[in-house]
Amino acid sequence: MASVCAKLRRGNIFRACAGVVWLLVAVVLCPVLLQQAAIAQEAEADTNAEKSEPLEEIIVVAPRTLSSMRVEIRRAEDNVLSLFNAMNDDNDYDIRCRQETPLGTHIPVRICNPRFVDRLIGRETQLFLRTGVYAEPVGEIRQHQEILNEMMRTMAEENSELRDEMLLFYQLKTRYDAEREERLEGKFFAW
């Protein structure tokens, strides 16, 4: 660059411009030409390799992560619940899921309850606020739970789609539990 400036000072602009152009050509075109030559050599090597012997196919199967298995279980559970809720005539037995964070932790958990559980606990909570006495509605919940179980069994017998979704959920959950147990054996964390 210093020689270009010296030529410009001497008034020889043509030689200075030619030097700059030559420098640009060398900097821009050389890498392009080298890259084209490398691509041509690679293509020639590929054609020679194809002619000589066939490529082997290698399939790598990575173990599924526990989190991806949990996502699949949640989807299956959502499918079962939406099918059941759509078929169910009594809204008191519809099952809803929500995220709750238990006291003493910041980790949310998914809670799925039929509406009758929320209704009965809400009723007892209002009674507690008025009287100061809380009576857990265990007996009523158990009675409604038996009715719900019978409804689900009957609907699964009558509807093959619901039965298939319930079976898929059960299989995914069983597979997840076995895989988790195997990965956690002797370890604090599972991958």
Image (tube, rainbow, N blue to C red):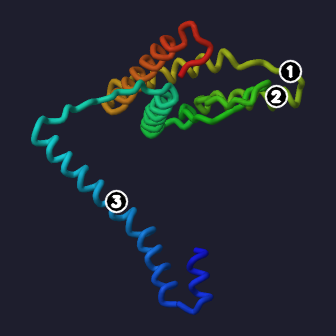
37 shown above or below 46: below
Q: Please give the label number shown on residue 127.
A: 2
- Disc 2 is placed on an element classified as helix
Residue under circle 1?
133
Above-or-below relation of 149 to 50: above
- Image marks 1 and 2: residues in contact by CB distance under 8 Å: yes
Mark toward the start of the polypeptide (1 vs 3): 3
| Residue type highlighted by circle 1 | Val
**Quadrant in the picture for residue 10:** bottom right
Give the SS element for disc 1: loop
Residue drawn at (50%, 79%), measured in percent from left and top? 20
Q: Which quarter of the picture shows residue 101?
A: top right
The amino acid pointed to by label 3 is Leu
Q: Residue at x 26, y 30 (%)?
A: 58
- First in residue order: circle 1 vs circle 2: 2
Residue 96: horizontal and vertical position, in percent? Answer: 57, 35
Residue kind at label 2, given as amino acid type: Leu
* Image depth: mark 1 or mark 3 in front: 3
x%, y% of residue 83? 42, 37
Q: Is residue 33 left or right of residue 56?
A: right
- For the residue pair 109 and 37, the one nearer the viewer reads as 37
Residue drawn at (45%, 25%), measured in percent from left and top?
Answer: 151
Q: Nearer the viewer, residue 187 or 42?
A: 42
Q: For marks 2 and 3, give the one nearer the viewer.
A: 3
Dot 2, crowdedness within 10 Å: few (<14), some or many (≥20)? some
Q: Image point 88% across, 30% down: which residue?
A: 130
The numbered disc on residue 34 is 3
Q: Quadrant of the N terminus?
A: bottom right
Residue placed furthest toward the front: 10
Question: Is residue 9 toward the left or the right of residue 25 in the image?
Answer: right
Please tell me how crowded label 1 is: few (under 14), some (14-19), or many (20+) other residues with Cα within 10 Å: few
